[in-house]
Image: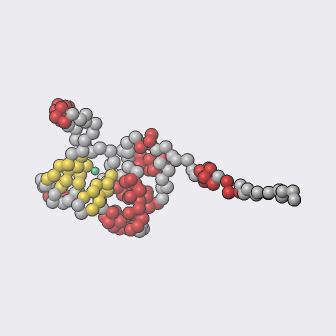
Amino acid sequence: MPGRKDLSLVDRMGDRDMNQLTNQLKTPKMQNEAAVAKPIRSLDDALNQCQVLGMRLSRQRRFILELLWQAKEHMSAREIYDRLNQQGKAIGHTSVYQNLEALSSQGIIECIERSDGRLYGNVCDAHSHVNCLDTNQIVDVYVELPEELLKQIEEQTGVRITEYKIDFYGYRMNQSQASV
Ligand SMILES: [Zn+2]
């Protein structure tokens, strides 16, 4: 008997490259490096930066940025929520928290970790704080240390100083200032 032809059927169907397909569907990553370097000095700068980073500028997000730039003080999420709702700008708790988280993680607003919780502020570049111990307020100040002192610190530590943030602590000198 002649040998039967052995038909071996090799199934090559499973070789489709799904990885390549999914890679094509992914959107390219945005390059944020150039955008991050620009300092934010005003509400307009902050709004602009959101757009540069591709963040959606919802009404709620705008409310929060406007409030922080108007108030120019450091506030907790709770205070921000209370103030906006007092102003008749309806915003939910979750929305406040999510927006603060997004804005601070992108470096558009300042976030200070304190033992009693987080505080948020409008300024995000290097600045110093005056902590008022009787009102619990934190006031932003720009302090310039004398060149000589900076040199001395550099010599002491072997670290070249590029920026600094100083925390001052103290009490109000008169009560009329405390209400500002
Ligand atoms: Zn600050």
Report the front residue among 117 and 174.
117
Q: Residue at x 29, y 58 (%)?
A: 119
x and y percent of residue 169 in the render? Answer: 16, 52
Q: Residue at x 23, y 35 (%)?
A: 159
Q: Specify the farthest residue to the front.
A: 1
Left or right relative to 2: residue 151: left
Judging depth in this view, the residue of 73 and 12 nearest the camera is 12
The answer to whether residue 160 is seen in the rendering is yes
Would you identify the image quadrant in which residue 99 lies?
Answer: bottom left
Classify 142 as above or below 152.
Answer: below
Tell me how many marks there are: 0
Where residue 117 appears, as percent x and y from the top left, is 27, 62
Q: Is residue 57 left or right of residue 4?
A: left
Question: Which residue is pictured at 64% across the width and 52% down the height?
Answer: 17
Return the x and y of residue 129 as percentages of the image width and height: 23, 49
What residue is rendered at 32% in x and 49% in y?
123
Residue closest to the eye, 2 or 65: 2
| 21 horizontally vs 126: left or right | right
Is residue 70 among what the camera can see?
no
Where 132 falls versus 163 (above or below)?
below
Q: Quadrant of the C terminus?
A: bottom left
Split into 4 quadrants, where in the image is the N terminus?
Answer: bottom right
